[in-house]
Amino acid sequence: MGSLLPDPGPSARGLKASADLLKVQRAVVEEAIRLEEAALTETIELLAAATPWAEWPERLRRALRAALTEAGEGVEAHKARWLHRHLFRDADPGWPPLPPSALSPLECRIAERLRADLPGQTPLGCGSRVLGKASR
């Protein structure tokens, strides 16, 4: 005996496949946001504790170096200069720049997140304490 419901056809099956793909894409974006948030939180904690630069995890050192790298005159370059002044005042950390071309897409997003959020969540000049204890 056949089904009383009509065959959903190819368009309904296509919609289900699209919905499944959308779920996967959403999960990827949510995971990236979680990683950004974790990097921001951990960076704030390291700055608050004045953890010596040499003791920072490499991924966070790269992220902060990238966040401080000024490239041109755009919005992100302005944020990088602002972040540098906020964290270090007149001190020069002496770190080589880390241009966006040397970063993965996730690392770029983390650097952008640090530029946007660190000034509002850290005390003025707190980066200088890291330099005082760090071997560059």
Image: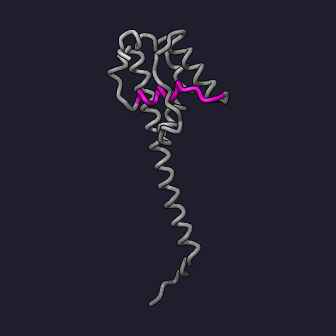
- Residue 62 position, x and y percent, is 43, 30
Residue at 39% x, 32% y is 59
* Residue located at (35% from left, 15% from top): 135
92 or 46, nearer to the observer = 92
Relative to 68, residue 124 above or below: above
Q: Is residue 61 left or right of residue 13?
A: left
Q: What residue appears at the point 49 percent right and 17 percent down from the top-left corner?
A: 122
Q: Residue furthest left?
A: 55
Above or below for 109 versus 77: below
Instruction: Tell me what residue is drawn at x 67 percent, y 27 percent.
Output: 73
Q: Main secondary structure of the magenta part?
A: helix
Instruction: Measuring from the top left, give residue 23's x and y in whole percent.
Output: 49, 55
* Camera-nearest residue between 33 and 76: 76
Res. 77 image quadrant: top right
**The stretch drawn in magenta includes residue 69:** yes
Magenta region: which residues? 60-72
Magenta stretch containing residue 68, yes or no? yes
Count of residue discs = 0
